[in-house]
Image (cartoon, rainbow, N blue to C red):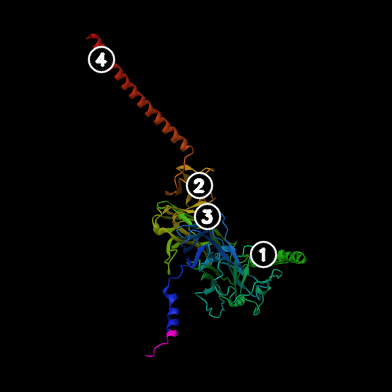
């Protein structure tokens, strides 16, 4: 082995010296989770953990848009710091809260360091699909079409699928187009959104060969920023379709959904002529209204565009064959206390030529890859007497209304409830509602945000928690602090922060508390009281000492007098 020259050996050891010496400990900032998905209206908690040796540091949160935007304190956005962990809590998240969030840690005499970022995805489920039948001016030779609409979802990741079936006819010749909004390209294979000055026309629905028009398109509301997805199914000439064909529109592949939503329509080859004429009359009337909008388009471009959009929907409103719909009236989700009653009410709307043939209530699990659907009750043939599968299940159907009642609600009764209404032609429409167990309050905790002089109260998974604060077992007054609107945060105005702060969280099933103990408070006049006590003790001690001296002096004088008397006697 060749020997290295002394200079090379020196350089080699010099290059290894930095690896042997200790490097200065820098900041280590880590955010978790990397991605967080929450439903609209819920609470999102983003955490940032760091390790610093200095006590002089600060933490800030930013949201990245075109440039970084500082997260300021508000009633919905709260920053909590504890044990070198900073948490950004966003309550009642909205769609505009979606994006990337970063925490920045600043230490004195060091460069700031950022975390790896957390992507917040706010989920909003799509609405139940609605199917509308577009009747052309000439029902015999014109182009008939079915339109399926859903909206209000986020993110823009969704699939609309058409299926059809018939037990009597061969319908393999029909062409179906599926609409898909992909997560990477929100427009997918859809047509682009029109400009504000563009006018939407419905003439393409009536063309016999609409080859140059899209079968799928989306509209984004400029005010609410909600996305609406439309899928058009062009039907063959009316004479070539047999009766009894059921078309179903499926809404699926959205991250906020646990199961597909459906709407169905059954084709009737002989529609009522009066309804056809009503459709034509309505279209003529609305066309006249559109002309008025066009005359004002020069000065009201944006308003004209919005009115055109509304007019397009009005033109597609069901005045024809399919008008039946069902809506559950309970606010979703429904929370039920164990052992109590679950009551679900649904409203049924039918067209002038429709009648309710069958109503069915079903339940399936809210989560799971393949949830099993269980039939709870059904009312066949429009009968007021319903068939219940369990003794604690009661169902009734009145005019335009149906009610499901479950007595002795238990954990097994939670899930997604579905009510399906079928008319006399076999067309079905379904509405869904999520039902969950009413949970008691669990694991209450209180943490302090020193930089904002506030205390934050948290609770694990209780339903409808109600927060209240106590200071030294007494309700909070203005001299101590103020409580936020949701009750979770106490902004302390008392300085310094001392004493015992108690957060009480309660709901219908009970309450639980947690206490934050600060340094003991110094009572006003404590020094004066101590001085008075010491003075009293000194006075008592002096009095006792004077009494003992007086008594001793008196005893000595008495002895002297006795000696003098004895001397005189002798």
Instruction: Name the disc covering residue 325, or none.
Output: none
The total of numbered circles placed on residues is: 4
Check the image and name the residue furthest to the top: 569
If you read the primary sequence from the N terminus, does the residue marked by circle 2 or circle 1 appear first?
1
Q: x, y percentage for residue 363? A: 44, 62
Residue hosting label 4: 563
Q: x, y percentage for residue 28? A: 47, 67
If you read the primary sequence from the N terminus, does the residue marked by circle 2 or circle 3 appear first?
3
Residue hosting label 2: 496
Based on the displayed image, in which of its 4 quarters is residue 141 positioned? bottom right
Q: Which of marks 1 and 3 is in front?
A: 3
Q: How crowded is mark 3: few (under 14 residues within 10 Å), some or many (20 or more)?
A: few
**CA distance for labels 1 and 3:** 50 Å
Q: Does the magenta stretch include residue 6?
A: yes
Segment tinted magenta in the rendering = 1-8
Q: Is any part of residue 346 visible from this angle?
A: no
Element assignment for label 4: helix
Q: Nearer the viewer, mark 4 or mark 2?
A: 4
Instruction: Name the disc covering residue 310, or none.
Output: 1
Element assignment for label 2: loop
Q: Quick one: quadrant of the N terminus?
A: bottom left
**CA distance for labels 4 and 3:** 85 Å
Q: x, y percentage for residue 216? A: 60, 74
**CA distance for labels 2 and 3:** 13 Å
């Amino acid at each position: 082995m060749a020997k290295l020259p002394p200079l090379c050996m020196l350089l080699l050891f010099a290059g290894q010296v930095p690896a042997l010496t200790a490097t200065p400990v820098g900041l280590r900032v880590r955010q978790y989770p990397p991605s967080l998905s929450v439903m609209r209206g819920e609470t999102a908690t983003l955490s940032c953990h760091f390790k610093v040796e200095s006590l002089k540091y600060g933490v800030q949160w930013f949201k990245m848009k075109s440039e970084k935007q500082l997260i300021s304190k508000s009633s919905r956005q709260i920053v909590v710091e504890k044990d070198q962990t900073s948490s950004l809590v966003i309550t009642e998240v909205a769609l505009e809260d979606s994006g990337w969030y970063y925490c920045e840690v600043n230490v004195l005499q060091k460069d700031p360091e950022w975390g790896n970022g957390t992507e917040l995805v706010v989920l909003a489920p799509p609405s139940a699909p609605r199917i509308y039948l577009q009747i052309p001016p000439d029902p015999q030779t014109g182009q008939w079409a079915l339109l399926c609409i859903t909206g209000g979802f986020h993110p823009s990741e969704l699939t609309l699928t058409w299926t059809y079936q018939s037990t009597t006819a061969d319908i393999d010749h029909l062409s179906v187009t599926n609409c898909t909004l992909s997560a990477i390209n929100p427009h997918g294979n859809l047509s682009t959104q029109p400009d504000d000055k563009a006018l939407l026309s419905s003439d393409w629905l009536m063309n016999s060969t609409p080859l140059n028009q899209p079968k799928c398109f989306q509209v984004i509301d400029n005010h609410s920023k909600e996305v609406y997805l439309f899928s058009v199914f062009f039907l063959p000439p009316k004479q070539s379709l047999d009766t009894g064909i059921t078309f179903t529109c499926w809404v699926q592949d959205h991250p906020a959904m646990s199961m597909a939503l459906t709407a169905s329509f059954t084709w009737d080859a002989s529609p009522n002529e009066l309804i056809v004429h009503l459709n034509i009359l309505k279209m003529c009337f609305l066309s006249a209204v559109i002309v008025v909008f066009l005359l004002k388009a020069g000065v009201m471009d944006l308003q004209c565009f919005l009115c055109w959009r509304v007019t397009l929907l009005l033109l597609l409103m069901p005045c024809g064959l399919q008008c039946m719909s069902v809506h559950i009236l309970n606010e979703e989700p429904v929370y039920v206390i164990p052992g109590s009653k679950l009551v679900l009410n649904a409203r049924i709307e039918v067209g002038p030529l429709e009648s309710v043939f069958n109503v069915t209530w079903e339940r399936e699990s809210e989560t799971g890859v393949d949830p099993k659907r269980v039939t709870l009750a059904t009312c066949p043939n429009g009968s007021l007497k319903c068939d219940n599968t369990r003794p604690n299940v009661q169902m009734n159907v009145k005019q335009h209304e149906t009610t499901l009642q479950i007595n002795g609600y238990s954990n097994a009764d939670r899930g997604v409830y579905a009510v399906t209404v079928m008319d006399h032609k076999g067309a079905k429409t379904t509405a869904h509602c999520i039902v969950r167990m009413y949970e008691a309050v669990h694991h209450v905790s209180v943490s302090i945000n020193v930089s904002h002089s506030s205390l934050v109260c948290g609770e694990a998974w209780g339903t409808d928690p109600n927060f209240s604060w106590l200071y030294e077992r007494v309700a909070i007054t203005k001299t101590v602090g103020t409580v936020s609107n949701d009750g979770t945060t106490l902004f302390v105005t008392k300085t310094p922060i001392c004493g015992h702060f108690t957060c009480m969280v309660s709901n219908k099933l009970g309450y639980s508390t947690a206490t934050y103990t600060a340094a003991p408070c110094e009572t006003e006049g404590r020094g004066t009281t101590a001085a008075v006590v010491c003075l009293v003790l000194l006075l008592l001690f002096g009095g006792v000492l004077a009494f003992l001296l007086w008594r001793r002096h008196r005893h000595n004088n008495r002895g002297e007098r006795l000696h003098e008397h004895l001397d005189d006697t002798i």
